[in-house]
Amino acid sequence: MEAEIENCPSEHHHINEARRNIIKTKAEIDTLKKVLEEKTIYFEKYAKRFEVEYDEMEKNYEMIIKNAHIRASKNNVLKIMLEKVNKEALLTDKEAKLYFYKKVREQLA
């Protein structure tokens, strides 16, 4: 392609190519800005929902887990969940704790 550019009869070819690249780059930047804005809105909504769910979980966690241990003798899924859960992850990862809580609560329903 470089040979074609060098042999191009138009002396303005390089300028036109640069302008085309600038337009293309601006369009790509605009697209990325839009994607970033959309993702920002999504994660702001996710964070708000997560905070509400996490607060609710913190209030009820001990009671739900206690009930789960009581019912685990009759519910094999609960028993396995309680045995296999990574307790260290629950202490360090809020999302993992909330996910575990929701799954246990589903089994109790």
Image: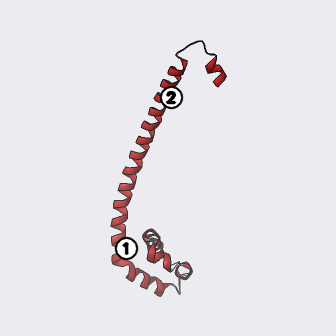
* Quarter occupied by the C terminus: bottom left
Q: State the mark number for residue 70.
A: none
Amino acid type for the residue under numbered disc 1: Met
Report which residue position mark 1 lands on. 57
Mark 2 and mark 1: span between their CA atoms? 52 Å
**In the image: residue 64, left or right of residue 14:** left
Whether residue 1 is visible here, answered yes or no, is no
Q: Secondary structure at mark 2?
A: helix
Q: How far across and down, in percent of the image, does residue 56 sit?
A: 34, 72
Q: Residues within 10 Å of mark 1 (few under 14, many from 20)?
A: some
Q: Which residue is depicted at the point 33% across and 60% down?
A: 48
Q: Which residue is depicted at the point 51% across and 84% down?
A: 72
Earlier in the chain: of badge 2 and badge 1, it is 2
Query: Looking at the picture, does residue 68 appear above or below residue 11?
Result: below
Q: Report the residue that reaches farthest toward the top.
A: 9
Q: Which residue is depicted at the point 39% across and 55% down?
A: 43
Report which residue position mark 2 lands on. 21
